Image (cartoon, coloured by chain):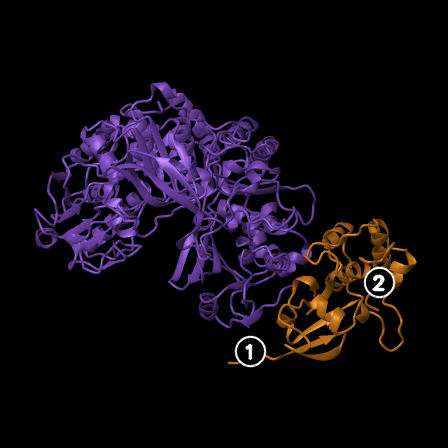
Chain colours: A orange, B purple
């Protein structure tokens, strides 16, 4: 049986067909494909070893590290990146994004997309997490600018504001 | 990442099949593997990555009366979230939750966590401390952690998975670090037996072997290599003193007869191992005494003949029959031997001169004959001015012997440049010390005679000895000449085997008997050959190795059994070393008696005392890998006495977690896949705890972890399993601590006693003794915790 020659991905609701050998090679990571093939530069690559969380995306409903997943292993899967959070029609930001802005929950901003995707995954499953649960969920997202305190405020505000899921 | 091919395995069987050919790696969660590939850690980059995530039905948690079964592809997150696991096997939840970060736990599998690659920074970051380093584990020469930064490494010794560099360098594969560690433990008897397993003539090799092992000793990169020679010599002498106690009795008689032709090192070694296997062994030799070149060529000042005689006696005492003064080919034909014996080993050596094509060469004396005559009692120099042609050890033996027997001058002339001379450096040094004149880069041109008597030899400049491909093809400059006066010329340029007795019986090619390199078998079934007769000029240890290989093959041939001897690897023991191994020390250096006291008969080097040898043995690193186990869940699973189901090319097997980590880094062989983890149901009254001490709360390995399961009845501990993580190359059962607890209440006092016992055997490296009090406190807390948890 021949190995598959194309990979079908739905990214932020949009279908993509990637040819193995032409668009991608088997050693490409999902983070590389998102950035290099699809131009979705919101997903960052920092440590590239699964340790820092900046590359976090939601794959089939779970927050995962896109630097540590091979694109060839994502055939038929659905990916949400930071670019997929805003309203595609109006361009309105997702409440989490807005709250991060409102609380200045970042400094350089490099880690922010990963943090937001991790929180999005958490709130999708557990809309009213405790502070401990938020911290636990974010324990794999590193921030060198120490934005953690503002991040907690931004996330808590979204939960308390009941804006989430609107 | 460097490119690779990628294949999805649809079934376990397909994954096994795909994995068994070419350079492959399995990918499950990928959280460990992709980093390994990106950093190009592995000595060989895989050509194909086999994805096993697509295999159905390997992601499950099932419970029955016997316990829990977890599919190897079950995600750590799902284990931590499973109500059954949370209720009954909480340390597995705690261990799973201790792994890295939530993201990793979402992706990583239980099987993957168990199979995590080695945890050591020299292993993990080979390109980040100045050039590529390949540690011992990757086929390199040394374990960098032994002598460099080792804060996070083992505090219970190392593990060895393959031969250390000294053993690999030894043609006889003597397991040197093992007998050295037995010397350190004061167990001389076992040390002697370990040595005898690969070398039955250590008193001899301890004196004459060039000891390639020392040149490969890892300690050589640190300060100076060990003097393995001197240790071997002392153990060898001890064996001769106590042979009756040390040597195992021969096995039950097989009623098979083996003839050994030649009693040099190859023949003696073959005879020894064959006799131990229970065969009747007869050694034939044409000389008056046994020992071959050991008895008749090597000068007594290097190898006292008493040592050779006692070695032969030791072999006679285990029932080997020696038939001396029997010349095979004259007194008995090899065909007759083939009829009368079930197998024949030929180890006749190389005793004939080689012609160099010099006019009048027949007037020269053959070096070997001179040395043999000295051994036969003709202790007389051949002349006043002795000229030796040759640059090897035999030439040196001739030159030194001549001087010691009263020659006024001894000159050694050889084609090779000084640094190319085949003699060992310390032998050349000794020759010069004793006033042997050494003239390298000269080729013999013309023997000078006066009144029919030799008066000297004219030489021409030798400009090179070997051609570009390394073949012997000397070139000369005839315009550059020199003359050496001499009244006798001795040829020590090479030796040829006398093969007349074997002609028409076995295949002979290029003056040697053709023998298989692995079995020493000739083309004739039942006839084997080794040593110089089959390999050309050889060291004693190479001949011994041939003899042992032949013995193994002959044994298999006689028993008509397959050669599959089955490696009973079992759990490898942790390797101990002297606690202060890392302090710079000097090598024990053998000294010779003063030049003016040296004679033709008395041994030049007196040897060392037992204490000196023990000190030297203390210097051995006992090279292994001192990494620590990476897996958090492995520690909990060993405490839970779990089993691992493995499917491989040879079928399915289920082994305990202890056995899984018993081989290094784990028991998986090429093609194997972990498919299931089985956790036995806990008994009534079971209590469990898992604690992990780490520097950062997330994405960190353990500095120390402790998992423990105890069974309590009426406030008393009935049974305890305590396992320490990150303190040794594998999860480590603290059996001494377990013994302290059984039959007692788990109070603070017992917890302290158990903690003390758990760390009693700790053997820290230079920079990680701080881990000991941490580990002790962790065990203490774990047990207090078990004592107070009501459940």
In the image, taking residue B650 as reference, residue B752 lies left or right, namely right
Crowding around mark 2 (Cα neighbors within 10 Å: few <14, some 14 to 19, many 20+) is many
> Residue at 83% of width from left, 64% of height from top?
A164
Question: Residue under mark 1: which chain is it in?
Answer: A
Using the image as rendered, state which of residue B452 and residue B438 is in the foreground.
B452
Mark whose residue sits in front, 2 or 1: 1
Q: Is residue B243 above or below residue A92?
A: above
x and y percentages locating residue A66 in the rendered image: 70, 64
x and y percentages locating residue B371 in the rendered image: 25, 34
* Element at label 1: loop
In the image, taking residue A143 as reference, residue B392 lies left or right, namely left
Give the number of the disc on residue A96: 2
Using the image as rendered, state which of residue B14 and residue B652 is in the foreground.
B14
Labels 2 and 1: the sequence-earlier one? 1
Name the residue tied to disc 1.
Answer: A3
Q: Is residue B43 above or below residue B602?
A: below
x and y percentages locating residue B673 in the rendered image: 47, 61
Q: Is residue B155 visible?
A: yes
Could you tell me if the residues under marks 2 and 1 are in contact, i.e. CB atoms within 8 Å?
no
Using the image as rendered, state which of residue B544 and residue B769 is in the foreground.
B544
Q: Quadrant of the C terminus of chain B?
A: top right
In the image, taking residue B126 as reference, residue B328 lies left or right, namely left
């Amino acid at each position: 049986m021949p190995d598959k020659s194309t990979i079908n991905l739905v990214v932020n609701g949009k279908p993509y067909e990637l040819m193995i050998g032409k668009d991608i090679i088997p050693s490409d990571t999902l983070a590389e494909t998102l950035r290099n093939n699809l131009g979705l530069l919101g997903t960052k690559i920092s440590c590239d070893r699964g340790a820092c969380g900046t590359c976090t995306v939601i794959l089939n409903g779970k927050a995962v590290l896109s630097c540590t997943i091979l694109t060839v292993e994502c055939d038929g899967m659905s990916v949400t990146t930071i670019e997929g959070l805003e309203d595609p029609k109006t361009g309105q930001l997702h409440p989490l994004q807005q709250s991060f802005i409102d609380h200045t929950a970042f400094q350089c901003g490099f880690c922010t997309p990963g943090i937001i995707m991790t929180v999005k995954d958490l709130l999708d499953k557990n809309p009213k997490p405790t502070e401990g649960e938020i911290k636990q969920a974010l324990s794999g997202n590193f921030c060198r600018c120490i934005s953690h305190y503002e991040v907690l405020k931004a996330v808590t505000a979204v939960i308390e504001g009941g804006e989430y899921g609107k | 990442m460097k490119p690779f091919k990628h294949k999805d395995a649809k079934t376990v069987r397909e994954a096994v099949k795909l994995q068994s050919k070419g350079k492959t790696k399995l990918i499950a969660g990928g959280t460990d593997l992709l980093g390994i590939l990106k950093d190009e850690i592995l000595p060989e980059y895989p050509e194909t990555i086999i994805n096993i995530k697509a295999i159905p039905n390997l992601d499950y948690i099932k419970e029955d009366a016997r316990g829990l079964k977890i599919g190897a592809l079950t995600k750590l997150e799902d284990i931590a979230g499973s109500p059954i696991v949370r209720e009954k096997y909480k340390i597995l939840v705690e261990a799973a939750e201790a792994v890295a970060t939530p993201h990793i736990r979402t992706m990583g599998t239980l099987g993957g966590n168990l199979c995590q690659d080695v945890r050591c920074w020299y292993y993990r970051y080979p390109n980040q401390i100045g050039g590529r380093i390949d540690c011992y584990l990757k086929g390199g020469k040394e374990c960098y952690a032994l002598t460099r930064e080792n804060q996070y490494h083992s505090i219970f010794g190392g593990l060895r998975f393959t031969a250390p560099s000294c053993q690999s360098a030894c043609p006889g594969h003597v397991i040197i670090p093992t007998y050295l560690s037995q010397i350190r433990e004061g167990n001389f008897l076992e040390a002697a037996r370990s040595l005898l397993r690969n070398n039955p003539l250590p008193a001899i090799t301890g004196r004459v072997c060039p000891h390639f092992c020392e040149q490969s000793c890892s300690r050589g990169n640190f300060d100076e290599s060990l003097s393995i020679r001197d240790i071997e010599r002392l153990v060898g002498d001890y064996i001769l003193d106590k042979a009756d106690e040390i040597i195992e009795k021969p096995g039950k008689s097989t009623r098979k007869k083996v003839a050994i032709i030649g009693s040099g090192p190859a023949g003696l070694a073959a005879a020894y191992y064959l006799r131990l296997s229970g065969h009747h062994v007869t050694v034939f030799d044409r000389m008056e005494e046994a020992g071959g070149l050991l008895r008749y060529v090597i000068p007594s000042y290097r190898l006292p003949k008493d040592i050779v005689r006692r070695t032969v006696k030791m072999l006679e005492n285990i029932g080997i029959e020696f038939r001396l003064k029997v010349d095979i080919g004259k007194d008995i034909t090899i065909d007759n031997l083939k009829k009368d014996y079930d197998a024949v080993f030929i180890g006749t050596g190389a005793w004939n001169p080689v012609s160099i094509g010099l006019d009048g060469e027949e007037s020269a004396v053959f070096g070997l004959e001179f040395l043999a005559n000295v051994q036969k009692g003709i202790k007389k120099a051949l002349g006043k001015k002795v000229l030796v042609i040759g640059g090897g050890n035999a030439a040196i033996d001739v030159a030194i012997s001549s001087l010691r027997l009263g020659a006024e001058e001894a000159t050694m002339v050889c084609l090779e440049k000084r640094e190319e001379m085949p003699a060992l450096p310390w032998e050349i040094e000794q020759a010069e010390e004793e006033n042997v004149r050494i003239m390298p880069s000269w080729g013999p041109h013309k023997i000078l005679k006066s009144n029919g008597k030799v008066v000297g030899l004219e030489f021409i400049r030798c400009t090179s000895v070997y051609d570009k491909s390394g073949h012997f093809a000397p070139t000369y400059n005839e315009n550059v000449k020199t003359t050496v006066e001499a009244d006798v010329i001795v040829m020590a340029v090479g030796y040829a085997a006398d093969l007349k007795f074997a002609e028409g019986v076995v295949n002979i090619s290029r003056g040697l008997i053709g023998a298989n390199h692995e079995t020493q078998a000739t083309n004739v079934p039942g006839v084997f050959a080794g040593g110089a007769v089959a390999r050309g000029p050889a060291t004693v240890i190479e001949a011994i190795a041939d003899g042992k290989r032949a013995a193994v093959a002959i044994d298999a041939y006689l028993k008509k059994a397959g050669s599959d001897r089955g490696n009973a690897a079992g759990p490898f023991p942790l390797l101990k070393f002297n606690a202060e191994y890392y302090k710079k020390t000097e090598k024990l250096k053998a000294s010779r008696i003063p030049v003016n006291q040296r004679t033709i008969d008395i041994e030049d080097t007196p040897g060392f005392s037992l204490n000196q040898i023990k000190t030297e043995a203390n210097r051995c690193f006992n090279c292994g890998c001192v990494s620590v186990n990476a897996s958090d869940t492995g520690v909990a699973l060993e405490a839970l006495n779990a089993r691992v189901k493995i499917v491989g090319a040879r079928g399915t097997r289920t082994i305990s977690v202890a056995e899984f980590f018993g081989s290094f880094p784990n028991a998986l062989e090429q093609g194997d896949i972990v498919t299931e983890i089985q956790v036995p149901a806990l008994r009534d009254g079971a209590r469990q705890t898992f604690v992990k001490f780490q520097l950062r709360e997330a994405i960190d390995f353990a500095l120390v972890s402790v998992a423990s399961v105890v069974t309590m009845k009426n406030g008393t501990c009935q049974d305890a399993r305590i396992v320490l993580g990150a303190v040794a190359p594998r999860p480590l059962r603290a059996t001494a601590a377990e013994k302290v607890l059984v039959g007692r209440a788990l109070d603070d006092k017992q917890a302290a006693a158990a903690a003390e016992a758990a760390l009693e055997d700790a053997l820290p490296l230079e920079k990680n003794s701080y881990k000991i009090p941490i580990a002790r406190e962790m065990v203490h807390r774990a047990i207090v915790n078990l004592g107070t948890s009501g459940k």
